Image: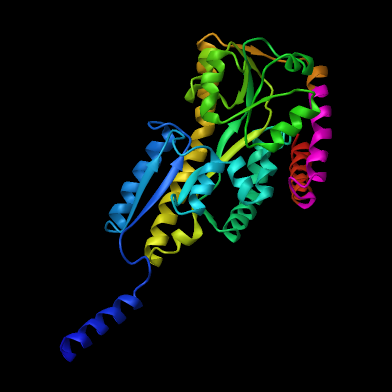
Amino acid sequence: MSRNRMALFVLIACVLGALPYGAGAQTLKIAAVVPDGTGWMREMRNSAKEIATRTEGRVRFKFYPGGVMGNDKNVLRKIRIGQLHGGAMTASGLTAIYRDAVIYNLPFIFWSYAEVDYVRKHMDPLIIDALRERGFISFGLVEAGFSYFMSRQPIRTVDDLRKRKVWVPDDEEVGRTVFKALDVFPVPLPLTDVLTALQTGLVDTVPNSPVGHITFQWHRRVKYFTDIPLIYLYGSLVIQRRAFERLRSEDQAVVHEVLAVASGRIDRRNREANHRARMALRRQGIVFVEPADEDLQKWKNVIADSVGGLSRKGIFSAGILTTLQGHLDDYRRIALKSK
């Protein structure tokens, strides 16, 4: 090989070595438990097209919807070994990254959507920053709505619940702990197995948002809707920070802008969708059950005791609960004065 050719190869190698690691095209592989064709997937696919256009094809997305990559735990494992780059995580998955992300999921912690909005305004940035510090970029927290029991038999009291075969996500310690406090022994299963479990009778009671009940077709296997908002459900699209930062800086800005706007739209639309879903369930003959005030208070008393136990077990920090409770107290004082 001539000296001139050798010098050329060395020059090319030096130039390539000086380029950012992600200077070429990157395909980000994203898992989602939601089925294809849902509003979330349509929004994500539209966002992916916009990102591909604005980055001139340097950033593309490949989605794996419908839970084909498994539950949040499986998705996180696949992210860490490089098989995936991110996922649409439920709060359970986010909690596996940052334990205090569970704080919005505590039962009966919120009394209304107005309280949710006030607290989220103050605490969403805290959760997003904590996820980033632990290696994941969130593009905004997304509301899934309040969770309600739907069942084959009416549930008005805690005693009614104790007679039911209740599903709980297999990776959700909060749910299992709360049910234990209620002397309920739930059936832990992956989300993707719930419909089959309803069909076979393995479970007869399932908690989810109104939209969730319809999206996963659970409402076709039950008859009653217990009108007690159990917990506030939310999630977030997250991408591994290491994979995200391989992109060019200008491409990172585009991805963050587009996905943040999309997450905000989904967040707002989901509340409207849950309102419409409630009406749709009524039209389809689902019977709404409203427990008496004294029964509702019994639910709250038992569950309030279990929340303290969760903190003592280290499932979340005492500090995060104090922070949330402080914001709730502030809101409730403001609301009381305005009456």
Which image quadrant: the N terminus? bottom left
Q: Position of residue 294 (x, y in %)?
A: 83, 18
Q: Main secondary structure of the magenta part?
A: helix
Q: Position of residue 34 (x, y in %)?
A: 46, 33
Residue 278: image quadrant is top right
* Residue 305 shown in magenta: yes
Q: Is residue 108 visible?
A: no
Q: How is the image coloured?
A: rainbow
Q: Is residue 13 visible?
A: yes
Q: How many marks?
A: 0
> Nearest the camera: 124 or 224?
224
* Residue 52 shown in magenta: no
Q: Residue furthest front?
A: 1
Q: Position of residue 198 (x, y in %)?
A: 56, 17
Residue 234: image quadrant is top right
Q: Position of residue 259 (x, y in %)?
A: 43, 50
> Nearest the camera: 220 or 114?
220
Up/down of 318 relative to 284, above or below: below
Question: Which residue is at a point 25% across and 79% down the rendered structure image?
Answer: 12
Q: Which residues are magenta?
A: 297-319
Up/down of 16 relative to 245, above or below: below
Question: Which residue is at a point 42% across and 61% down the rendered structure image?
Answer: 253
Q: Does 223 sit left or right of 228 as displayed?
A: left
Residue 43: image quadrant is top left
Q: Does 232 sit left or right of 19 as displayed?
A: right
Which image quadrant: the C terminus? top right
